[in-house]
């Protein structure tokens, strides 16, 4: 019975067996031809074994058509291939299918792309490292250049300073009451008078002019409930307002208080009050008539403080020590002296007695 299976349906062993049978048949045929031609003499020819079926006939009887209707695959057995020796069978599974070849090509391309990408990444890393190194070198160069420039400038400045002549230092502007007692002015002539700048140290006459003649828009320290507002001295008939400051305008308005931060309610400190004796109402015209033991009052919004005269003194305009604190609550009254001469100051000391 002929085998109707196609080559695709046969196993490898079956195909090898068929080819072996075919080769053996061909050898037998060649030997027979050689015997017929007298080329081989067999004195005792053996009984030939029963001949197996012709593999060619088996192959011819096989149906190699594809059950799916595709063309059958044929095997071309060329004579020269038989002369070269035993042929090795070739099977369909030894041929790479298109899908496998495509996958292999894709794998090769993936390996190549991976190699290229990693190479590019390495190149980029090297480039970044180079740029960082270049930036650091540039920054160091700039820093060195700036340091060299600063050193050159410093050397040049030293040379210029060495070549410049030494200039006498300008006296520092001090507070007016640190140099001279308040209230100083020239004797009035036909009712006119001015601040006596000659009482100041030489060279500072006009450096404190803004402390004497304050501008019209000058704003004084706002008074509080503890600020001294009035002074009452019954023995010489004085009742006058107290203004914060001892500049020219303050003494025009009333009795000026030196701005040393002392308030009547303080348990220690010297409350210094000054007024003119021959201009602007002559408020302190008669303080030289006060005697030890006489009393007067200083008024705030909260309280009336009483003081008792403890002593008098006549000093030079620059004897500013009389304004210093004595460690107790007290008042010092200051005015120019003698009347309409104004070369000295008349001082009255008084201690607070209501505590």
Image (spheres, grey):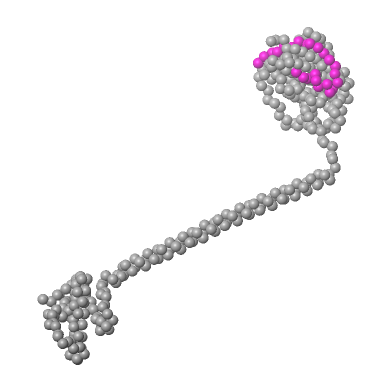
The N terminus: image quadrant = bottom left
Quadrant of the rendered structure where residue 69 is?
A: bottom left
The C terminus: image quadrant = top right
The location of residue 33, given as percent across then percent down, is 19, 88
Residue 316 magenta-drawn?
yes
Q: Nearer the viewer, residue 159 or 188?
A: 159
Query: Looking at the image, which residue sits at the far left?
Result: 1
> What is the count of numbered marks?
0
Q: Nearer the viewer, residue 190 or 26?
A: 26
Query: Is residue 16 shown to the viewer in this render?
Result: yes
Query: Is residue 281 shown to the viewer in this render?
Result: no
Question: Is residue 123 found left or right of 317 in the rendered image?
Answer: left
Residue 288 magenta-drawn?
no
Quadrant of the rendered structure where residue 305 is?
A: top right
Query: Looking at the image, which residue sits at the far top?
Result: 293
Question: Is residue 191 found left or right of 125 in the rendered image?
Answer: right
Q: Residue at x 25, y 75 (%)?
A: 89
Q: Residue at x 84, y 37 (%)?
A: 168
The location of residue 70, given as percent across then percent down, is 21, 75
Question: Is residue 61 found left or right of 131 in the rendered image?
Answer: left
Q: Residue at x 61, y 53 (%)?
A: 136
Q: Nearer the viewer, residue 314 or 338?
A: 314
167 relative to 315, above or below: below
The location of residue 246, given as percent across then percent down, is 77, 24
The location of residue 295, given as percent across then percent down, is 76, 10
What stretch of residues is rendered in magenta?
A: 302-325
325 relative to 205, above or below: above
Quadrant of the rendered structure where residue 231 is?
A: top right
């Amino acid at each position: 019975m002929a085998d109707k299976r196609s080559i695709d349906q046969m196993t490898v062993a079956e195909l090898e067996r068929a080819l072996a049978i075919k080769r053996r048949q061909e050898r037998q045929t060649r030997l027979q031809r050689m015997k017929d031609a007298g080329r081989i003499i067999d004195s005792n020819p053996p009984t030939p074994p029963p001949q197996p079926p012709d593999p060619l006939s088996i192959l011819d009887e096989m149906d190699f058509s594809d059950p799916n209707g595709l063309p059958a695959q044929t095997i071309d057995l060329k004579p020269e291939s038989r002369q070269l020796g035993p042929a090795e069978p070739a099977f369909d599974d030894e041929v790479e299918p298109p899908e496998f070849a495509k996958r292999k090509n894709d794998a090769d391309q993936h390996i190549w792309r991976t190699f290229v990408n990693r190479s590019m990444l390495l190149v980029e890393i090297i480039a970044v490292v180079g740029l960082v190194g270049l930036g650091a070198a540039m920054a160091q160069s700039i820093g060195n250049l700036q340091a060299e420039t600063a050193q050159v400038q410093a050397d040049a400045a030293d040379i210029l300073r060495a070549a410049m002549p030494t200039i006498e230092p300008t006296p520092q502007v001090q507070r007016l009451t640190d140099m001279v007692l308040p209230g100083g002015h020239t004797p009035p002539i036909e009712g006119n008078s001015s601040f006596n700048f000659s009482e100041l140290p030489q060279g500072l006459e006009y450096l404190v002019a803004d402390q004497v003649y304050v501008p019209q828009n000058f704003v004084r320290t706002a008074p509080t409930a503890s600020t001294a507002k009035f002074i009452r001295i019954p023995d010489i008939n004085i009742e006058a307002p107290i203004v914060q400051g001892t500049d020219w305008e303050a003494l025009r308005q009333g009795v000026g208080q030196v701005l040393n931060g002392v308030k009547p309610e303080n348990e220690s400190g010297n409350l210094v009050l000054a007024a003119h004796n021959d201009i602007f109402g002559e408020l302190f015209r008669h303080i030289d008539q006060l005697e030890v033991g006489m009393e007067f009052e200083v008024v705030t919004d909260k309280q009336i403080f009483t003081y008792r005269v403890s002593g008098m003194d006549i000093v030079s305009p620059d004897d500013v020590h009389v304004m210093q604190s004595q460690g107790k609550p007290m008042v010092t009254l200051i005015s120019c002296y003698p009347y309409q001469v104004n070369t000295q100051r008349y001082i009255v000391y008084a201690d607070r007695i209501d505590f």
